[in-house]
Every structure is written in C-alpha cells, then in structure tokens.
Amino acid sequence: MKQSIAPNLAIVLALLAWPLLYYGFTLQSIDYARGTPLEYISSVQHRATVIFAVGLLCLFSSLWLSGRSLAVAKVRSLSSLGICLAFFAVAVYAMWT
C-alpha cells in the first residue's frame, strides 16, 4: 500500500469505528422483558459482539495506519490519532459518570 493512501484510510477507519463501537455497545446493554425468548437474546448478543469486534478492529487498524504514515502525512495521521483517542476519552468519561 502506498504511504499516501494510508492516512486517508486511517481517517476513514477511525470515523467508521465510532458508530460500530457505539451500536455494538448499546446492543450489549439492552435490558430485555421477561417473556423474551432466550434464542432471540442470544442471537442479538452474538450480533452485538461481532459488531463491537469489527469496530475495535477498525479502531486499532486506524491507529496502526496512522503510525505507519506519520512520516509522510503528519496532519492527517495526527487527526486520525485524535479521533481514536477521543473515543477512548469518551469511554473513560462514560465509565466514571
């Protein structure tokens, strides 16, 4: 892969990771009604785990690509790093409140 494409892909992956991680987390934290079948709950939790894992893969791939392309495109690389670190800051803030 060209090093000029890596920072652009890092930004795209970082922006794609946010909704995937949010959606996967919110699906995991659903409180179901008493009469909900266990098969349905299990399928939703499996789907949420896969969505969350894909979001983490996008996030860590974005971090790797931004580090790989730091010498070529500093501004784009640092902006994708900032997007990723903003997610971690929001997650830590959400845990403390």
Image (spheres, helix red, strand yellow):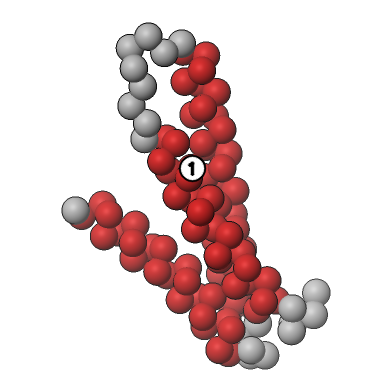
Q: Residue at x 49, y 29 (%)?
A: 45
Specify whether residue 72 is in view. yes
Q: Residue 66, how many percent across, how many down?
A: 60, 76
Assign a secondary structure to mark 1: helix
Give the number of callouts: 1
Q: Residue at x 64, y 89 (%)?
A: 73
Q: Residue 14, how many percent across, how many down?
A: 55, 66
Q: Which residue is mark 1?
A: 24
Please name the amino acid that badge 1 sits on: Gly
Q: Residues within 10 Å of mark 1 (few under 14, many from 20)?
A: many
Q: Judge whether 81 appears above or below 28 on screen.
A: below
Near-viewer residue (31 or 80): 31
Which corner quadrant of the image does residue 2 belong to?
bottom right
Q: Residue 75, how many percent across, how many down?
A: 56, 89
Q: Judge whether 59 appears above or below 34 on screen.
A: below
Q: Judge whether 11 appears above or below 26 on screen.
A: below
Q: Quadrant of the N terminus?
A: bottom right
Q: Residue furthest right?
A: 1
Specify whether residue 56 is in view. no
Near-viewer residue (36 or 21): 36
Q: Residue at x 67, y 90 (%)?
A: 72
Q: Residue furthest left?
A: 97
Q: Residue at x 61, y 64 (%)?
A: 13
The answer to whether 72 appears left or right of 90 in the picture is right
